[in-house]
């Protein structure tokens, strides 16, 4: 597989002349890579929606519930890195589609446990892998040093932008 460096045109900095021009080219190369990343995520989400009739985030949620039947809503939200209310809204949609059911747990009726239905299991059996999504898979495949550098760089970028939406960190990338 060709590296992103060969797929997104980014000549070496020394070919650009001045340091300012090289920095401009580097900025453009990063913007291009971000576009490729976003388009890839959009394409993956679109394919999941077309193939399965659920969003990529909903598919991941079903997958997590299937891995651990009886999972709580709070535990699911942690696994998906989303807010509990976002998870609850997602579960409403899955339940309406007949793919998941919620059951009250024993004595404490406040605790809700999640289970896939036969229809949900069938969907998972025929769904493309990985259910957790391409971004999650790719990030887990990165060497630890690269992942740490990416985390730091994105943190720096968000600080400079001065408009971070803290709530956005707890919502799926694609709408569900």
Image (tube, rainbow, N blue to C red):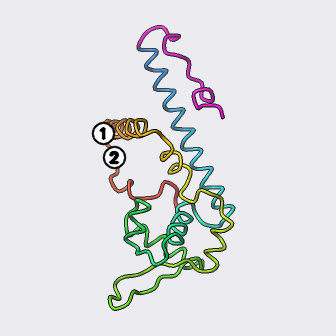
Q: Secondary structure at mark 1?
A: helix
Question: Is 89 a magenta residue?
Answer: no
Most distant residue in the bottom direction: 107
Is 2 inside the magenta-drawn segment?
A: yes
**Mark 1 lies on residue:** 159
Lateral position of residue 97 relative to residue 146, left or right:
right
Which residue is pictured at 50% across the width and 67% down the height?
A: 64
- For label 2, the SS is loop
- Residue 139 against residue 94 in the figure, above or below: above
Q: Magenta stretch?
A: 1-19
Tell me the distance, in whole angstroms, between the alpha carbons under discs 2 and 1: 7 Å
**In this figure, which residue is indicated by the disc labeled 2?**
164
- Asked if 151 appears above or below 84 in the picture, the reply is above
Q: Residue at x 42, y 62 (%)?
A: 79
Between discs 2 and 1, the one toward the N terminus:
1
Crowdedness near tag 2: few (<14), some (14–19) or many (≥20) residues, C-alpha within 10 Å: few
Q: Are the residues tagged 2 and 1 within 8 Å (C-beta)?
A: yes
């Amino acid at each position: 597989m060709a590296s992103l460096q060969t797929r997104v045109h980014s000549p070496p900095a020394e070919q650009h002349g001045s340091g300012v021009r090289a920095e401009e080219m580097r900025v453009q190369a990063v913007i291009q890579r971000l576009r490729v990343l976003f388009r890839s995520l959009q394409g993956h989400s679109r394919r999941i929606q077309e193939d399965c009739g659920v969003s990529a985030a909903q598919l991941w949620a079903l997958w997590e519930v299937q891995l651990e039947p009886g999972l709580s809503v709070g535990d699911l939200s942690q696994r998906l890195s989303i807010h509990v209310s976002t998870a609850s809204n997602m579960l409403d949609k899955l339940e309406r589609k007949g793919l998941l059911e919620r059951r009250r747990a024993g004595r404490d009726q406040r605790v809700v446990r999640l289970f896939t239905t036969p229809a949900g299991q069938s969907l998972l059996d025929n769904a493309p892998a990985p259910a957790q999504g391409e971004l999650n898979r790719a990030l887990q495949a990165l060497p630890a040093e690269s992942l740490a550098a990416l985390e730091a760089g994105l943190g720096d970028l968000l600080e400079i932008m001065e408009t971070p939406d803290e709530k956005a960190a707890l919502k799926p990338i694609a709408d569900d």
